[in-house]
Image (spheres, grey):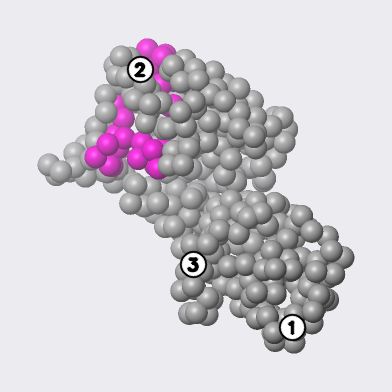
Amino acid sequence: MAAEALAAAGHAVAVYDSMASPARKFLRAGIGGLNLTHSEPFEAFLGRYGAAAGPLRPMLAAFGPEAVRTWAAGLGIDTFVGSSGRVFPVGMKAAPLLRAWLRRLDARGVRLYPRHRWLGWDGQGRHLFATPDGQRTVDAPATVLALGGASWPRLGSDGGWRSILEARGIAVAPFQPANCGFDADWSAHFAQRHAGAALKPVVLSFAGRSLRGEMVVTRTGIEGGAVYALSAALRDAIAASHGATLNVDLRPDWDLARLQAALARPRGSRSLSTHLERTAGLRGAAAGLLREVLDADTLAAPWRLAAAVKALPLRLLRPRPLAEAISTAGGVDFAELDDGLMLHRLPGTFVAGEMLDWEAPTGGYLLTASLATGRRAGLAAAKWMSG
C-alpha cells in the first residue's frame, strides 16, 4: 500500500522482498477465505486495537473498512459482508486480488526485487541487502520499512530487523504471540484420541469476557477463533501468574437446570460416555475433556458434573511459540514516530504494518490496519520528498 501511494504521487518506487514471490503472508491469510475487514461501526472497530487505538485512529479514519472495500472494488474485486459481519472478496480467494494489485503497481512503474533480504545500512547509510548474487547496496531518498512482525517466519517475517533498529537507539517492544493457541499439557491418551477435534458451539469466558465460537483441541492444548479473540488477555495473565484458567461452557444452549435434570437421570449399567451422550449430547472430545479435567467424584455427582459442563475450568500453561502465532504483539514504539510514521531518529525512514507496536484480533482488523498504516507511511514519504 505504501508503494501504491508513492507511485500515485509520481515517485519512482522499488519494492524489495526477501521471499521469491511477493505477499506470501497475504496469500496465507487467504487460506479458508480472505477476511479483508469488518463491517461493524467505526468506534467498535477501533476499540479492537486496545491500547493502540489512539495512534491508529487517524489512519483508520482515513482508510478504514469502507475504504478497504472501495479499494478492492477499484481492483475489480467485489466484496460481501458475511453473517458474522466480516468482509470477504466474492470468491473468497486472495490470489485474484493480489494479481490485480500487482498489475496495477506494475502499470505505475513499481519495480519488484524478490530474494532481497534487508540487512540494515552500510557505513555510508545505504541500504544493504543479501541476494542470491551476494550483498547489494541501494541508496534511496526515502524508505518505508514494512518487514512484518515475527510470526510465520517461513513466509519472510522473522523479526530480524529488531536488533538493527535497536542498535540505532529505537525502542522496540518485545515480540509476543498474538492470536495464538495455548498449551494445556494433555495426557497422552487424550491428545492421541482427540487432537484435531473441534468443539462448537462453546462459550469461553475469561477476565469478565465471554465469547461464543469454536475451540479446537490440539496435540498440546487448544486453538480456534474464540481462543484467539481471548489470547491477549490469556497471554498476559499467564506471564503475570504462570498460568490462566479459562472457563468453557460445553453446552451453551442448555441452562444449568436442564443440564442437571438430564444428568441426574438413572445411569444404570451404561458407561459414563454413553450416559453423557444420551442425556446431554456430550460426545467425543467434549466428553473426553470432562474426563481429562475432572476428578472421579465430580464425574459421579450429577449436580457437580452439570456445573462443570457449564464452566469447565481449563488450566492453560503457556502460549504456543511465536512462530506458530497468526500475528505478533510488540514492535516499534509509536513514540519513536511522527504522525506520518517517520522515525524521529532516522529522517526519511518510515515504518508500517506489523512492525509497529499494535495487536488486534482476527476478523479483518489485522489486514485493515496494515493497509492503513502502509498508506499513511507512503503518503508521508511522498510529502517528505516533496519538501
Residue 215 locus on image (x, y percent): 60, 58
- Circle nearer the N terminus (2, 1): 2
Nearest the eye: 384 or 243: 243
State the SS at label 3. Answer: loop
Name the residue tied to disc 1.
Answer: 268
Tag 1: amino acid: Gly
* Residue 112, picture quadrant: top left
Tag 3: amino acid: Ala
Looking at the image, which residue sits at the far right?
257
Q: Which circle, 3 or 2, is nearer the viewer? A: 3
- Left of 109 or right of it: where is 287? right
- Circle nearer the N terminus (3, 1): 3
Name the residue tied to disc 2.
Answer: 104
Tell me the magenta residue range. 1-29
Name the residue tied to disc 3.
Answer: 195
Identify the residue at image location x=48%, y=37%. Answer: 33
Identify the residue at image location x=70%, y=68%. Answer: 278
Nearest the eye: 188 or 379: 188
Identify the residue at image location x=61%, y=28%. Answer: 81
